[in-house]
Amino acid sequence: MPGIALVGTQWGDEGKGKVTHLMADGMDMVVRYSGGNNAGHTVIVGNDTFKLHLLPVGILYPNITSVIGPGVVVDPAVLLDEMDALEERGISTERLLISGNAHLIMPYHRELDRLSERRLGKYKLGTTKRGIGPAYADKATRIGIRVQDVVDQKIFVQKIETALHEKNQILTKIYGRLPMKLNQIVEEYLGYADRIEKRIVDTTPVIHAALDAGKSVLFEGAQGTMLDVDHGTYPFVTSSNPIAGGVCAGAGVGPRALDRIIGVAKAFVTRVGEGPFPSEEAGEVGERMRRLGNEYGATTNRPRRCGWFDAVIGRYAASLNSLTEMFLTKLDTVLSDFETVKICVAYEFEGDRFEDFPPHQTIFHKATPVYEELPGWRTDIGGARKWSDLPKEAQRYVERIEELVSVPITQISVGPEATETVTRLTSTPPPRAQQA
Ligand code: GDP
Ligand code: IMO
Ligand code: MG
């Protein structure tokens, strides 16, 4: 029963879309387990570009069952738009299942996300303004609306009424906005209900049945380890658990369901939104990285902040996720242009050196990166398909990251398409439990 988790190891946008597309080929099921349409997963196939926000990347394959799990927050308007857009391009969305336990993003969630960011002013988080935080907050305070609620109109109206009563107080009294109208919301959402009803199931037994039958299930991570609400750079995080542990809660499987846990890491680091980023290059170097890598958000189109590979967060991600292997992406672009390339190996703060993720946020905020500088390769490596095709400087860079993070780098991405990949180790390392 191969269960494979694929998680982002940095601040998102590591190339999970490309890697999922490659890995999903030949699999039976792809499951999104956390986040919502704050994600933007790019898949490029020839001249076709797909930017998937809510649908699992498995949807691009006709034989794969795609599952939106209980841990996801679903904006039904976005979901239906995304499905329609794919159908128009000749891609069937028939094999999509949506968990009845997933929570719905409501219009007041989006509005409160926007208003809260505006209120925070210079302390804003830089969210995607998709209503993610307010939707997860309602889930935790237990006034959320779940996908399954749409099939019972009476309960649906009651629940929205209860939630809206509170939201309208906040909208009018705190933010001085007009109240939202119950009827309008109900009418809009019941319209969506007609279209999604037949896809709503209890996805948990479906996933278990697949695993029990020996089918292969890929759990597609969204966001990244450093955006995890419990382990990331709080409060500059998202409101869910993108880490491998999040697979268990968000999809409804136990830890033993995961045979492989693949960490996707970009060969340099990017971050969208606010928050600390020790190896950031805020000046010309960062600008050059952004230009070379075309680093603009797939969801909000915001310029991504860029910097050097950070082995401290790499190690942190390796242990938090129990990574069995790493998939290093975007080695082809950006770094190929530099005379020398840097890796952040530690932080310094007030005379102390930190090789592990520091215990207090102030240290991380004010950390000075300690760099190791390696020779660059200054050549186009986009055509590399095997390890020996890579220049020795690029090989050394990969090996050095591997040494620092202590996880085998099994595959290296040298272009956005699935074929543009160097498979380094053909045999998959065994899961941790069997390694000792
Ligand atoms: P995700 O959110 O983790 O799926 O990543 P995004 O799709 O938001 O951003 C990754 C970007 O890098 C996308 O534009 C991909 O097409 C692109 N990409 C992924 N892997 C590679 C690679 O190895 N080389 C290059 N040049 N681009 C890549
Ligand atoms: P993928 O799956 C990069 C960031 C936002 C913001 C913070 C909180 O494409 O890697 P939110 O809207 O979630 O409340 O915003 O999290 N963020 C992402 N950054 N990639 C993502 O997803 C992200 N999803 C959320 O920019 O800093
Ligand atoms: Mg993205």
Image (tube, rainbow, N blue to C red):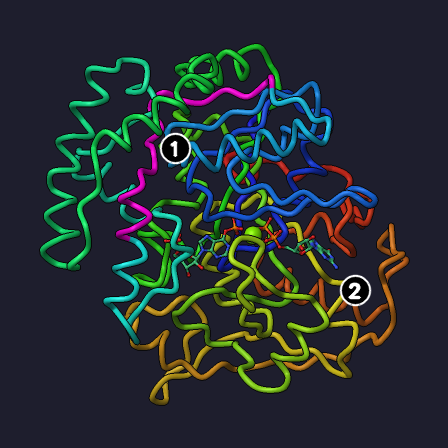
428 vs 423, nearest the viewer = 423
* Residue labelled 2 has its Cβ within 8 Å of some atom of ligand 1: no
Give residue 260's position: percent from left, percent from top: 57, 35
Give residue 284's position: percent from left, percent from top: 62, 86
Whether 97 is among the magenta residues is: yes
Give residue 406's position: percent from left, percent from top: 58, 57
* Residue labelled 1 has its Cβ within 8 Å of some atom of ligand 2: no
Query: Magenta span covers which residues?
Result: 94-112
Q: Residue at x 21, y 42 (%)?
A: 180
Q: Residue at x 20, y 30 (%)?
A: 160
Q: Residue 46: which quarter of the image?
A: top right
Of the two numbered discs 2 and 1 on the same chain, state the one appearing first in sequence: 1
Q: Nearer the viewer, mark 2 or mark 1?
A: 1
Q: Which residue is mark 1?
A: 250
Q: Find residue 395 and name its label.
A: 2
Q: Could you tell me if residue 434 is visible in this image?
A: no
Whether 329 is among the magenta residues is: no
Q: Residue 24: which quarter of the image?
A: top right
Q: Under tag 1, what secondary structure?
A: helix
Q: Under tag 2, what secondary structure?
A: helix
- State whether residue 181 is above or below residue 284: above
Q: Mark 1 belongs to which amino acid?
A: Gly
Q: Could you tell me if residue 384 is visible in this image?
A: yes
From the viewer's perspective, tell me whether residue 102 is left or right of residue 259: left
Q: Residues within 10 Å of mark 1 (few under 14, many from 20)?
A: many
